[in-house]
C-alpha cells in the first residue's frame, strides 16, 4: 500500500513538472532566438550621424552611440570613446550573436593585431584593409578593419561576435551573415532617410 502511494505521488510530481515546464516555455516563446533573416531588407538600414550605416536583421535591437556623447543621451559620464552601432537580437539569452561597427580615431596600422589570426574563410566584398578572427572569452569573433574613404584620421572596425562556449566549436562566419556584413556603407544618409 505504501509503495502504491509513493508511486502515485511520484507520477503526480512528474506530470506537474512537465505542465509547469511547458507553461514556462509557452510564456517565454516570444524570446526564443531564431537568428537573422536570410535576406537583409534595406528598410532595416541603421544610419549613424558620423556617416556610416549597415542593415540590421529584422526585429533586432540597435544602439547608435556618438564619440564623447553621453551614454543613451541621458548620463553625462561616462562617455563613449568611438562612434558606433551595436546590433543584437531581441532575446533574453545570456550569450547571443552581436554585430558591432565602430569608427575609431587613428590609423588602423597602429592597432595591435598581433594576436589575431588572418581570416581563413572570407567573403567580405568591401575594400577591407585586413580581416581577422580570434577567440575572445566565450565568443568567436570575425572582424574587419577598413580605412575611412574620407579621412586618414579614422578607420572602421566591423566585428561579428558569435557565442562559442566550447572553445574551438565556432570557426567560421555562418553563410547568412555575409550579406549583412557586406551591407556596410561609409556615407551620410540621404535627406529623408531614417
Image (cartoon, grey):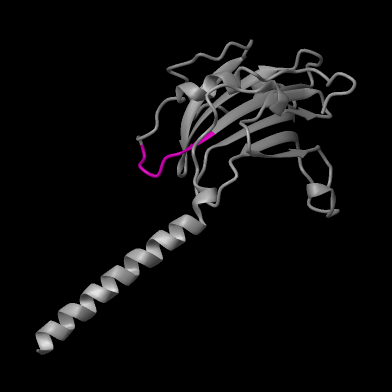
Instruction: From the viewer's perspective, tell me whether residue 24 is left or right of residue 109.
Output: left
Instruction: From the viewer's perspective, tell me whether residue 9 is left or right of residue 117.
Output: left
Above or below for 85 versus 7: above
Point 52% across, 43% down: residue: 96
Q: How many marks?
A: 0
Above or below for 22 versus 9: above
Q: Residue 28 in the image: x percent, y percent?
A: 51, 55
The front one of 172 and 110 is: 172
Single out the residue that lies furthest toward the right: 191
- Residue 11 visible in rendering: yes
Point 59% across, 30% down: residue: 159
- Residue 111 visible in rendering: no
Where does the magenta region start and end? 161-167
Point 44% across, 62% down: residue: 23
Q: Residue 113 in the image: x percent, y percent?
A: 55, 27
Point 67% across, 20% down: residue: 184
Above or below for 64 versus 131: below
User: In which quadrant will I find the N terminus?
Assistant: bottom left
The front one of 125 and 120 is: 125
Quadrant of the image occupied by residue 100: top right
Quadrant of the image occupied by residue 145: top right
Q: Residue 105 in the image: x percent, y percent?
A: 76, 28
The front one of 105 and 133 is: 133
The front one of 40 and 26 is: 26
User: In which quadrant will I find the C terminus?
Assistant: top right
Instruction: From the viewer's perspective, tell me whether residue 136 is left or right of residue 190.
Output: left
Amino acid at each position: 500500500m505504501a509503495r502504491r502511494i509513493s508511486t502515485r505521488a511520484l507520477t503526480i510530481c512528474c506530470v506537474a513538472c512537465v505542465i509547469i515546464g511547458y507553461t514556462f516555455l509557452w510564456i517565454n516563446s516570444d524570446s526564443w532566438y531564431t537568428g537573422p533573416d536570410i535576406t537583409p531588407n534595406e528598410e532595416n538600414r541603421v544610419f549613424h550621424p558620423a556617416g556610416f550605416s549597415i542593415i540590421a536583421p529584422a526585429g533586432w535591437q540597435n544602439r547608435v552611440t556618438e564619440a564623447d556623447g553621453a551614454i543613451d543621451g541621458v548620463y553625462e559620464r561616462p562617455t563613449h570613446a568611438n562612434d558606433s552601432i551595436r546590433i543584437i537580437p531581441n532575446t533574453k539569452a545570456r550569450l547571443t550573436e552581436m554585430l558591432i561597427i565602430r569608427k575609431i580615431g587613428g590609423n588602423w596600422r597602429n592597432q595591435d593585431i598581433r594576436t589575431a589570426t588572418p581570416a581563413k574563410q572570407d567573403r567580405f566584398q568591401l575594400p577591407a584593409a585586413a580581416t581577422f578572427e580570434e577567440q575572445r572569452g566565450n565568443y568567436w569573433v570575425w572582424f574587419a578593419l577598413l580605412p575611412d574613404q574620407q579621412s586618414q584620421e579614422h578607420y572602421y572596425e566591423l566585428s561579428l561576435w558569435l557565442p562559442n562556449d566550447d572553445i574551438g566549436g565556432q570557426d567560421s562566419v555562418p553563410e547568412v551573415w555575409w550579406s549583412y556584413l557586406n551591407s556596410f556603407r561609409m556615407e551620410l544618409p540621404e535627406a529623408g532617410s531614417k
